[in-house]
Structure formats: C-alpha cells, structure tokens
Amino acid sequence: MTCKDAMDLYCYLDQGEPLPADLEAHLASCPTCTQWVQRMDSVLQLYKRSGQHPIPTPIEDRILAAIEALEATPTPKPGLTLSPGKWMLPGVFLLLGILGIPFSTVFSVFASQPGGNLEVLVPVVLGAAFTTYAAFFTGYNLEWLKKKFLT
Amino acid sequence: MGSDFEIIQEVLRGNRCLYGELVRKYQHQIYALGFKFFRNQEDAEDFTQEVFLKAYQRLTTFRGESSFYTWLFRIGYFLGLSWNRRKRPALPIPEDYDTPELSGGPEQLHLRKDAVAVLRKALEELPERYRICLELYFTFGMTYQDIANVTDIPVGTVKSHVFRAKNRLKDLLSGTVAEGPHDM
C-alpha cells in the first residue's frame, strides 16, 4: 500500500469506523502518514468545534408554551377544500350530460320497465341534481363568489 | 427517565411536560443546525422552536425505527430547506467565522486555520442540500447512513461528497508532511 492509497482509504472511512488492517499496518510503519492522520483528525475536530453553537437562551419554556397554545386552539373542522375551479369541473360535466340527453339512447333501456315513460322524469331528476350541485357550489364558495361578483 | 422512546411514549400518554426533557437534550444541536442554515441567532431560534413543535405534532408517527435525534434532524433538514427557499438565502460566512481557540505553535495554528478555511470553502461551493449534508457529517458527527436517512440523499452520493471534501483537506495537509511513496 502506498501513502496515497492509505490517505485515500482513510478519507473514505465513516465516522467511528475501525481502521482496516492493511491501513493500520501501513500507519504503524509510516511516520509520514501517521503525522498526516493526526493533522487531519485535529483539523476535523477543530471544524466540529467551530460548528457548535450553544443556544443563547434555553428555549424549552418557549416551546412548551407554544405547545400549550397549540393544544388550546380548537382544531377547525375539516371542510371541503376544493378550489372553485375544481368545483366547476363536475358542474360542467353534469350540464353537458343534461344537454346530451336528447342525443343519447342510454335511457331507452328504462322505457320497457314499469313506469318507464321517462320523457318528463329524466329532465326533472337531472334538473334537481344540477340544482343541488349549484346549491352546494354556492354554499361552499360563498366568499369566493362574493369577491368575484360583488366587489 | 429512560430512553427517548420511553419518554415519547409517556408524552403520548398525556405527560406533556416530559417533552421538555427532549427539548433540553437536543435544543443545542437543533439550534446549531438552524445556525448552519441561516447564520443568524434570531432565525436559528425560530427554527429551533418550529422543529420541536413540528416534531411534537408528528410524535405519533415516530416508531423508534431510527433514533429520535435522527428523526428530529430529518424534520429540521427539510424545514430548513423549505424556509430558505421561501425566506432568504443564508448569509455568506465571514472570514473569521467562529474559529475556536487553538493551541500549538504558530505554524501549526496557521496551518490548521487554513485547513478549516479550506474545508469551509469546499462546503460553501456546494448547493445548500449537499452543504448541509456535509455539515451533518463534519459538525454533527453523523454516519453516512444516518445522513442518507435524514436527507434522502443516496448513501453513495453522501460518501462521494464527503470524500471530495476530505480530499481537498488531504491535498492541503499532505503538502505539510514529508511525503514520499511508502510501499508495504
């Protein structure tokens, strides 16, 4: 093992990793590398010490007070947090669905069922669905709608 | 009180005050980490508080698979990165940045100061996430694996960054000792 190999190997070692046998043997017979290792260690120790920043004022009380305040604050009930844009998307699909009914035969399978005259029922049901959707949309996005249309 | 894990179990059972023990135990390290990110006392203190608060809120998710110290540092590492992105870049390190008192002859002192400066410069040249990753190694004494667990940076990448930084030191220090090939 050359000195360069020894130094490279030393640089690869992890924290607290024991020296490999060949490196140990090299160091035992090479004062140059031993001196280098000592210097390297002392520089790393020095660097470590330079990074120690004890906290100027203990922060424990501040943290415990913050935790207390946090726990005293009632947790807001999780609500529907969809953005208005995402809210509109299902509405658009619903509307397109209603508009597409005259061009679709999808409901014709119900025509042969008892009470299958759906000519009035389907628009009424879908109209009700859209009205319900619009009501929810308005309710959950009242602030946004106010901002958009009233200011 | 026993181990960190036992303290956490007690805190989760409602003995909230015991959390103070964990804060007392790790506040200096977390503050030092904050100082590595922001390099000023005020931000480092706010950071310390936020890390402990976040850790408290997530305490139920701590399963003891890693040490509490590593887990806390993980929270701190990602919080520091996101604060730095949102707030401001860290101040540059001043030339005479906190070098501790040295002992030894004037030549040795000069050399060691130079070597620390070289290491610091090597770290400064790296992007923030890697710089902090090396600080975890050189300042906080974490192993490669611990650093990978904290930062989500692959172990191999951590190793190669540490190796490169040590190599710069090696080059500086090997010029100061009588060198020569020495075969075994």
Image (cartoon, coloured by chain):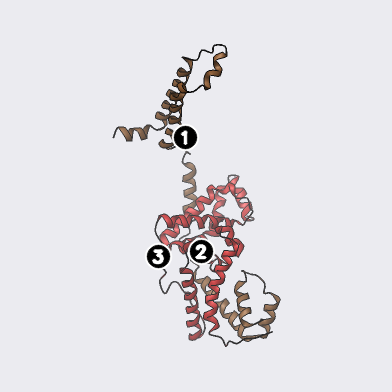
Chain colours: A brown, B red
- Distance between mark 2 and mark 1 Cα atoms: 39 Å
Q: Is residue A117 visible?
A: yes
The residue that label 3 is drawn on is: B91
Q: Type of residue at label 3?
A: Leu
Q: Is residue B11 visible?
A: no
The secondary structure type at the circle numbered 2 is: helix
Q: Which class describes the residues within 10 Å of circle 2: few (<14), some (14-19), or many (20+)?
A: some
Q: Which class describes the residues within 10 Å of circle 1: few (<14), some (14-19), or many (20+)?
A: few
The residue that label 1 is drawn on is: A80
Drawn side of residue A31 relative to residue B74, left or right: right
- The answer for which chain carries disc 3 is B
Q: Type of residue at label 2?
A: Tyr
* Residue A19: percent from left, percent from top: 67, 74
Q: Nearer the viewer, mark 3 or mark 1?
A: 1
Please tell me which residue is depicted at 42% across the width and 69% down the height of the picture: B93
* Residue B23: percent from left, percent from top: 53, 56
Q: Is residue B62 above or below residue B108?
A: above
- Distance between mark 3 and mark 1 Cα atoms: 41 Å
Residue at the farthest left position: A151
